[in-house]
Amino acid sequence: MNRASSLSIWRERLFGTPFTGFLTLVLLFAIAWVAVPLIRWALIDATWVGSTRADCAPGGACWVFVRARFGQFMYGLYPVDQRWRVDLAGILFVLGGLAAVFAPHRVRLKVAVAMLVLLPPLGIWLLSGGFGLRYIETREWGGLMLTLFISIYASLIAIPLGILFALGRQSELRVIRLISIVFIEFWRGVPIIAVIFLASLLLPLILPGGIGIDRLARAVIGLGFVIAAYMAEAVRGGLQALPKGQGEAATALGLNYWKATGLVILPQALRISLPAMTNEFIALIKNTTLVLVVSILDLLGIAQASLADPNWVGMNMEAYAFSGAIYWLICFALSRWSRSLERQRRA
Amino acid sequence: MTSFLSFINDKRVRDWIYQIAAVVFLVGLTVFFVRNASENMVKAGIASGFGFLWRTSGIEVPFVLTGYTQSDNILALFWVGVANTMLVTVIAIVLATLLGFAIGIARLSSHWLISAIAGAYVEFVRNIPLLFFVLFWYFGVIAALPAPRQSISVFGVAFLNNRGLTIPLPDGMENFRIAGLVILACVLGYSAFSIWARRRQARTGQHAPTLWAGLVLLLAVPLLALTWAVLATRWDIPALRGFNYRGGFAVIPEFVALLAALVTYTAGFIAEIVRGGIQSVSHGQTEAGSALGLRPGQVLRLVTIPQALRVMTPPLTNQYLNVLKNSSFGAAIAYPDVVSLFMGSALNNTGQAIEIIAMTLAVYLVIGLAVSALMNWYNARIALVTR
């Protein structure tokens, strides 16, 4: 397509008829009315360098505040000299994920299972310490690192449990089906904020006396159970999309239930449900913010807490803009990925 | 031995063994948890039972619809929370539906810029946590509003400031009741008329002016009735006295912030449902409608919308239930809903975690199940009848 024709397409789109042209002008004016002050605030009148609030010009955004608190936004109150542990854990998780995705086809499953078994305990050890590392209490964790930690570990609970209950819901065994339906519908029916309260209040109560359970672990378990119910519904979509012949063929080959499920049904069903499961993971990242109500400070919690800093009064907009942008980038990227998976499958 | 082997290899027997094992496991787990809980509660000196509901609550609530006062019992406090949850849910559903439909239809506009703006809105709100919007509206927007003395006046009767929204309150509901009866009569009259018109058209082919009847009975008369009711009622209009508004009905800022967050967030999801629903009706349907001689408006009303609604109803129901559940996000800014009043304040005062959590969850589960049942019935009614 050459330049002139693309220009004429735009002219046709925006000014095709007098009415279209009129609407375009009105809308452009409205956009400018909103965008110009916003851009002036965020970029043109903003202060980028400095060290205190006094360095910031009034009327513009004070990005100095974000720079000064960048470490907190990322790591919470995690001790500065120990932050390499968080970075290392993050790098290991990324490498492990890449290894599982790009391993040769024959060993891919083994690599993935190895990573799933090795990485989570390794991550917890790196973050919380022990065995030669300084012990760091979970109350010092925070910021983006905590958002990612909760999302990943809650989905480590949610995905296996979700698959199990999705299978249970499709089971021929009536009692198993009933148990699965009750589990799924119960957790899907209650607000997540109530579940986080519930987990933080009830878990210490129903475990044998003397077993203290970490505040953060309670929130992760609570979130894991709710998301498991949503994951189960995502997996059920994949199971239902699979032609019945697949299971029947597997049975005809002499595979028992678990082999037919593990070798024939799940590999195909999970591929179909992957976009839906990704969407549930996005929802999980967004809902992780609710740990704020039990005073665990994830990225949004840290942003909210930073508003109380007497040295940085009135930084509401900067704190919200920065944390909101990070959430948006992560969730938008994931949702684009999920959409491209969906397209690949459909094609 | 062989008979035993063939017994346990029988699929039906095995199925029963698995199911019994599952039940035994669940019952065992429950017993384990309950025993621990009762031991732990005895140790911590926590009472059990629902007797606490009749104790005086002593909890002050800033936003009450039910006439509750501090000296009422805890059960009354529970109902205050339920009422507040329902209030914000219902209003948010209505407003989010309106905004969501507008954005969803704008997304399908043939005007490129309108569609792009709607698309940008949807992508913006869907990828940001709801709690972010709640906090943003509360600490970012409402807190930045002017003080009462410089309130933003809405037509001189309602006032928005950093202490919330003050709206006029009718002195009596008598005129509104009459208007409601008039509107009800109009709706019934219109239904009867359209049924009669449809039957006559089927029988004789004669067309009756249902559109005009609809305009008069469903739009003009109700509008007139409502206008009369508004004008004939005496209103308690808020007025500035000292540092704040007196009179009228004061809506707390937490309500305004939570409502704004729920509406702006949910509208993004509803817009996608509306777009998907309308797009799901294939173009051939519209063409077939036109080929049958239907006018564009009739195609929309008789062909597109009924089919789009069938696709949209289940996900819309889900969104409405999400609004109900998400109204609990108000707990983060201390909007007195059932979670923050009952699971928060009442639980702190009494310590009876299990009873209070069960009652709170029951509110959501009961409403959710009722709505699901209603929707299943509706879905079955409008489902495509196939052979």
Image (spheres, rainbow, N blue to C red):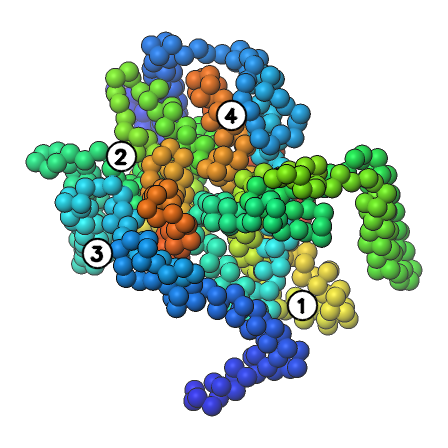
Query: Front-most of A118 and A145?
Result: A145
> In the image, residue A161 lies at what x, y percent?
34, 37
CB atoms of marks 2 and 3 within 8 Å: no
Where does the image place residue A72, in percent across and percent down from the top left?
27, 47
Residue type marked 1? Thr
Q: Is residue B96 above or below residue B236?
A: below
Under tag 3, what secondary structure? helix
> Do callouts 2 and 3 point to residues on the same chain?
yes
Are callouts 1 and 4 both on one chain? Answer: yes
Which secondary structure lies at badge 4? helix
Tell me whether the residue at label 3 lies in contact with that at label 1, contact meaning CB atoms closer than 8 angstroms: no
CA–CA distance in space, label 3 to label 4: 46 Å
Label 4: which residue?
B342
Q: Nearer the viewer, mark 2 or mark 3?
A: 2
Disc 1 vs disc 4: which is toward the camera?
4
What residue sits 46% from the left and 64% below the top? A38
Residue B180 visible from this viewpoint: yes
Mark 1–mark 2 Cα distance, whole angstroms, equals: 60 Å
In the picture, the disc for residue A139 is 2
Determine the image quadrant of residue B289: bottom right
Under mark 3, the amino acid is: Leu
Residue B272 is left or right of residue A280, and the answer is: right
Question: Mark 3, mark 1: which one is toward the viewer?
Answer: 3
Question: Which disc is residue A98 wearing?
Answer: 3
Q: Which mark is residue A279?
A: none
Residue denoted by label 1: B286
